Amino acid sequence: MKLPGKIAIIGGGSWATAIAKIVLEQGNDPICWYMRREDRITDFKRLGHNPAYLTSVKFDLKRIHFSSDINEVVRACDTLILVTPSPYLKTHLKKLKVKLKDKFIITAIKGIVPDDNLIVSEYLSREYKVPDENIAIIGGPCHAEEVALERLSYLTIACSDKEKATLFAQRLSSYYIKTSVSEDVAGVEYCSVLKNVYAIAAGICSGLKYGDNFQAVLISNALQEMSRFLDTVHPIKRDIDDSVYLGDLLVTAYSNFSRNRTFGTMIGKGYSVKSAQIEMEMIAEGYFGTKCIKEINKHYHVNMPIMDAVYNILYERISPTIEIKLLTDSFR
């Protein structure tokens, strides 16, 4: 396998656009870019930028081969970067006739495959027989909007094959993108799901007018909860204070760019789940992640009061005021 070889971006949202920008800036090689909607591809080619996301980022169209045919893109490339919303991943992959097991696959999906309740790396291994050493994860802390502005950002590439992680990390490094590598694939991936759940909690509390003092206590407890869960489902030696864990949690819980925090704020202000989703016009991965983590935790029984509170608010329709009040009484 030639690494990274020819790279494909699978997905057309803001994070996919940001990653495409990073990849194209480092080196002169062209990329393939799969987008589901042919009209989006047409508009992209006409405008020179993504018509719906990060519209300020201009692209050299001569270096991009667009296609709405996922088989064409996968067949032509060595490295695939998956950046679709988790609820739609199965729909895209079911169209595949090309085998994935010989590709190097990087998942930048910050969610769990619904119904299967598997993180994406496990899903690729189980359903498509992709070897563990051919699966990597992109972890934060990093918002697409700040990549578009070329603000200094940090990424962690996690892979069981550290050499492959290093090669891909080098491909992403630039004056505003700093990279590091990790072998904690499951831990980084679960963290990217959990931090969205906790960002929804932070948003709910913001919508309920809890202040900064309480938010600090909330996120301190969220980090402890995350640590308990990671140590149970994937018990290896890790430093939960590393930026890929704590940093990603902080930026997602506090940043105005965080769609999960925004979604939670709307819920805290009294929006229904459906009305908040419609008004946002973007997917808050934490909504789906909350239900999946709840299901997964039925097997592990980790004490997760914050996750449980978010689940009760989103899925059991318990009043945010009541649920958060109960949560506050449990904090110290």
Image: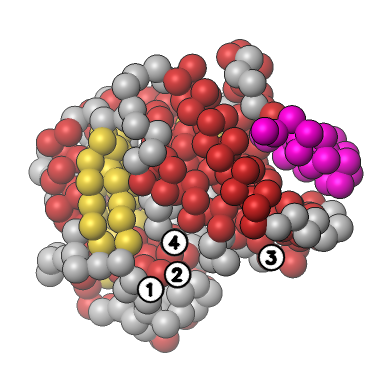
6 vs 207, nearest the viewer: 207
* Residue in the image at 76% along x and 38% along y: 328
97 vs 51, nearest the viewer: 51
* Amino acid type, callout 3: Met
Q: How far apart are labels 1 and 2 at the CA level?
A: 5 Å
Q: In the rendered image, is residue 138 in sight?
A: yes
Q: Which label lies toward us, 2 or 3? A: 2
Q: Which of the 4 image quarters holds residue 6?
A: bottom left
Q: Is residue 140 left or right of residue 273?
A: left
Q: How far apart are labels 4 and 1 at the CA level?
A: 9 Å
Disc assigned to residue 143: 4
Query: For mark 2, what is the residue?
Result: 145
Q: Position of residue 153 (x, y in %)?
A: 32, 61
Q: Are marks 2 and 4 in contact (CB under 8 Å)?
A: yes
* Amino acid type, callout 1: Ala
Disc assigned to residue 187: none
* Residue in the image at 46% along x and 80% along y: 55
* Residue in the image at 67% along x and 33% along y: 332
Q: How far apart are labels 1 and 3 at the CA level?
A: 20 Å
Q: Are marks 1 and 2 in contact (CB under 8 Å)?
A: yes
Disc assigned to residue 280: 3
Query: For mark 1, what is the residue?
Result: 148
Q: Secondary structure at mark 1?
A: helix
Q: Which of the 4 image quarters holds residue 44?
A: bottom left
Q: How far apart are labels 2 and 3 at the CA level?
A: 16 Å
57 vs 84, nearest the viewer: 57
Q: Which residues are magenta?
A: 306-332
Q: Is residue 17 left or right of residue 2?
A: right
